[in-house]
Image (cartoon, rainbow, N blue to C red):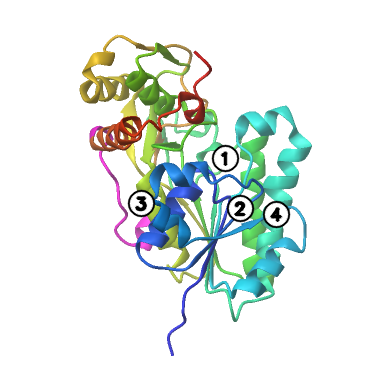
Amino acid sequence: MPVTERFLVTGALGCIGAWTVRELVREGTPVVAFDLAADPRRLRLIMSPDELDAVTFATGDIAEASTIPDLLDEHGITHIVHLAALQIPFCRADPPLGARVNVVGTVNVFEAARRRLDQVHGLVYASSIAVFDAADADARTGYVADGDAGHPTTHYGVYKQANEGNARVYWQEGGLASVGLRPMTVFGVGRDQGLTSAPTRAIVAALVGRPFEIGFSGRTLFQYTADVGRTFVMAARSGLDGARIFNLGGSNAAIAEVVAAIEAAVPEAAGLIRITGDPLPFPDRIDASGADALGPLPVTPIGSAVAQTVDLLRELQANGRLDPLEHGLPAA
């Protein structure tokens, strides 16, 4: 008899979490959205009221040991998408809190799933390209190959690397299969905080006619929010054995190309967006071929992804719902 799926998404009120929840709701899969926060503002940006009514919301602290076991039992969870984490600036500002949320919280998820192997049939968690330093790339080609060792230079990257190690031990000692995905520069509606949120905030600034400065230059690997949410759902259903870790592919582009795409979609904003600062401290040429094991993954070209983001934001704007503060811009 086929298993009736019921997903738990931790960190569901964040950017990737919101798009993952939307993906599940639109395909008709029951989903429990778990977060420490209680305001589903990012979900409201991309989902209709009827779609939101289909979501079961749960609030709590992932670092508390009993939280995840209680959720799994109460809701009969069969698949977990674990996204709850503090991002780079917050981990830098408070490393003990970052470790508590990012590492202890993830161990709590692993442990709860390990004790329910007959119930939980899929577990995917968010790692990050931040497990690598730019110096980890091949000096000649600038390329990070699948399977290369990382030497993170941020607390956030170290925490993510620790999670990958714990996933490996949980497979070796407890038989818990998992998939870790390493996104890089995720962008789209709802990406309003974190080191690499500037390109998305630049789109909002363009639409409201405000100057904006993207504080890093060079190239990076862009991943559109809708693609990322869909990929996490695919990974949770993959049925792969082992503690698998995949770099997430996308569109490799210069920041200047993104600015050009924004100006093409919002012509009246030409000249408003500036690029300053050094390149990101991560490699930009990443081997993502290992993720082929998940099946054909969605990758929306950068120009189309920017245009789709602009369309969503224009719809909010037309309905009087485009609040710059809500999208990470400072008060005018």
Mark-to-mark CA distance, 3 and 2? 18 Å
Tell me which numbered mark, 1 or 2, is placed earlier along the sequence: 1
Looking at the image, residue 143 lies above or below residue 61? above
Mark-to-mark CA distance, 2 and 4? 24 Å
Give left or right: position of 9 versus 189: right
Tell me which numbered mark, 1 or 4, is placed earlier along the sequence: 4
For this rendering, which residue is in front, 53 or 62?
Answer: 53
Type of amino acid under label 4: Gly
SS category of the residue bearing label 1? helix
Residue 80 x, y percent position in the rendering: 55, 64
Q: Is the Cβ of the residue at disc 2 closer than 8 Å to that at disc 4?
A: no
Tell me which numbered mark, 1 or 3, is placed earlier along the sequence: 1
Residue bearing mark 2? 164
SS category of the residue bearing label 4? loop
Type of amino acid under label 3: Ser
Look at the image and say whether residue 124 sits in the magenta stretch. Answer: no
Crowdedness near tag 1: few (<14), some (14–19) or many (≥20) residues, C-alpha within 10 Å:
many
Type of amino acid under label 1: Val
Residue bearing mark 3? 289
Residue 277 x, y percent position in the rendering: 48, 13
Q: Is the Cβ of the residue at disc 1 closer than 8 Å to that at disc 3?
A: no
Select label 2 or label 4 by which is in front. 4
Select label 4 or label 3 by which is in front. 4
Give left or right: position of 312 versus 86: left
At x 30%, y 36%, the residue is: 315
Residue 153 appearing in the image? no
Mark-to-mark CA distance, 1 and 2? 10 Å
Residue bearing mark 1? 131
Residue extent of the magenta highlight: 289-303
